[in-house]
Image (cartoon, grey):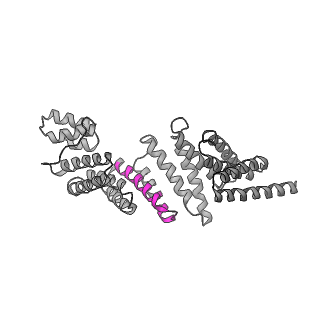
Amino acid sequence: MDYLALALQGDYQGALSFLAQEKTRNEVMEQALEYALGSVEEPPSAEGLNGEALAFVLMLQATNAIEKNDCAAAMTTLRAAITVARPVSPELTAQLLAQLATLESENIALAIQHLREAIGLAEGMAKADLLLQLGIALQDAAHGSKAALLEAVKAYQESLRFGITIESKPESFALLQNNLALAYLAMPMTEAGDQLRIGIAVQSLREALKVYTKENYPEQWASAQLNLANALQYIPTSHPEENLIQAVEIYDEILAVRTKAFDPVGYARLLANQANALAHLGIFSPAMEKISEAYKLFQWHDEPEMAAAAMGLVENISQQRGHANGSA
């Protein structure tokens, strides 16, 4: 393995050691590796280089441009690097295409195209990481399209197959499982069989929560817990009461950390969701108290559509309570 192979794997210190051991006098590459390690502030000129070495230095120059918030220069440099790398290094080409894809914020279709090409060139864990990146891009571009969301799901599943696990990459695994759940939950429920996806989403969220603990990842934990509680209300099951009780308990946990003072509208949405679960359990008085508070918060914070939805739930709970009292 030579110094460039080590550098492409991110082992910049190892690459420097290799250069020293081989007594190589390539000052440009030494400076490039020093920049990658953070020892110097600027990458070197690419003058006199060719092949992988040229592409690698161009990649570092693009990174430097990104750090200076010059995305246009970074994209131009990355395209030049890709042109150089394509004939000589599939691995480096894949890295460059992935980096370019992250900058294509205004053209998601082109970003997806770059990622697909990169995936075709990459192997092993690099392919797994790129598939995760592709899934996120597809999901962002889906806008509720079932076909696009299914593509994202396929990318996430392939990412798991190529090596992202809770042991190998816990944060990537949790992000993948959370996004996989959101993709399933965002799909239109037009057929009876579609509701089975809610069960898969619940399982994915439980997997994500093995990593996203309240202590270590409070924001991600709260978000995943909220999605889990919402999904538990609608999962097809022979014991809905158990799921509803669990949902109510989860909402209580989230309400303890996402306070009214911090995010009053988000707090009101939590109250509304919890009220809905309580109503389904037949616990009408607490449900009415919570939805009434949510309605007031929506009104105070100028959210007329949410306020109207809350009022609809108030009326629905009143009807349910009336029917329950009438049959008692």
Number of numbered callouts drawn: 0
Kindly report the secondary structure that dominates the magenta region of the rendered protein: helix
Q: Image quadrant for the N terminus? A: top left
Report whether residue 277 is seen: no
What x and y, as percent, mark residue 119?
34, 56
What x and y, as percent, mark residue 65?
28, 48
Magenta segment includes 242: no
Report whether residue 189 is seen: yes
- Closer to the camera, 73 or 242? 73
Magenta segment includes 150: yes
What x and y, as percent, mark residue 59?
25, 49
Work out whether 153 lies above or below 167: below
Q: Residue at x 77, y 48 (%)?
A: 283
Magenta highlight range:
126-153
Left or right position of 167 against 96: right
Q: Dividing the picture into quarters, in which one does residue 81 lie?
A: bottom left
- Closer to the camera, 259 or 283? 259
Q: Dividing the picture into quarters, in which one does residue 93 lie?
A: bottom left
What x and y, as percent, mark residue 240?
70, 52
Left or right position of 54 against 10: left
- Closer to the camera, 16 or 300? 300
Left or right position of 80 against 171: left
Q: Residue at x 63, y 56 (%)?
A: 303
